[in-house]
Amino acid sequence: MDAELERLIGDIGPRLNRVRQDRGLTLDELAGATGISVSTLSRLESGKRRPTLDLLLPLARVYRMSLEHMIGAPQTGDPRAHLTPYHRETRTGIDSVVIPLTTYPGRIQVFKQILSPTTATPTLVTHPGHAFFYVLAGTVRLMLGDRERLLKPGDNADFDAGSPHWFGPAGDSPAEILHLYGPHGDRFPAG
């Protein structure tokens, strides 16, 4: 095997570890979601187990990432991202459709998110990272600590996700946002 291929394969374990940590998952949670044992996942992430398709495909499905992005394969051919929308209910009770616009792990992630109206009482959450969103359509209600704002199309929010927060559509109509999230507290360049 040539040195470049050996390096690529050797980098997969640490890369998978970063992706899991960026997603805030424990090995136990990932094992439950993929059906792969904790010990196999641990050996895979530490490089003690060679990656195989029967291990990588369930991980790609759970991470909602293309296999080539998940393992860091070199770019070939068509550079367009193939968007795969998915349905998600957040910890805050908001039902949404999420369309990932980036798939590279460990970096700022970009999503288009369609937020459905809810009758649930807003529950403030905290998590690591930094969040930014831009309102594309509808009105978004943002609760950040003890402050509340209504954001219209063209408005944006930029905040530390470690601060208690909640956002969702205001009223009975859905809202659409362009949502950027930095898993390591990454800030977005000022324009």
Image: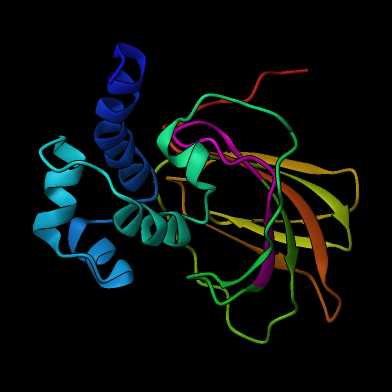
Name which quarter of the figure residue 126 lies in: bottom left
Name the one closer to the observer, 49 or 23: 49
Position of residue 94 relative to residue 85, above or below, is: below
Give the quarter of the figure containing the N terminus. Answer: top left
Numbered marks: total: 0
Name which quarter of the figure residue 21 lies in: top left
What residue appears at the point 57 percent right and 74 percent down from the top-left corner? Answer: 122
Q: Is residue 82 left or right of residue 50?
A: right
State yes or no: residue 105 in magenta.
Answer: yes
Name the one closer to the observer, 59 or 191: 59
**x and y percentages locating residue 103 in the rendered image:** 58, 41
What residue appears at the point 41 percent right and 57 percent down from the top-left corner? Answer: 57
**x and y percentages locating residue 174 in the rendered image:** 82, 72
Position of residue 101 relative to residue 6, above or below, is: below
**x and y percentages locating residue 59 in the rendered image:** 37, 56
Give the magenta-colored segment's residue range.
96-110
What residue appears at the point 15 percent right and 65 percent down from the top-left corner? Answer: 37
Name which quarter of the figure residue 97 lies in: bottom right
Q: Is residue 90 left or right of residue 52?
A: right
- The residue furthest top is 3
Position of residue 167 relative to residue 102, above or below, is: below
**x and y percentages locating residue 86 in the rendered image:** 63, 67
- The residue furthest front is 1
- The residue furthest bottom is 119
Q: In this view, does 115 lie to the left or right of 16?
A: right
State yes or no: residue 21 in magenta.
Answer: no
Colour scheme of the picture: rainbow
Name the one closer to the observer, 52 or 149: 52
Give the quarter of the figure containing the C terminus. Answer: top right
What residue appears at the point 67 percent right and 59 percent down from the top-left corner? Answer: 84
Name the one closer to the observer, 18 or 2: 2
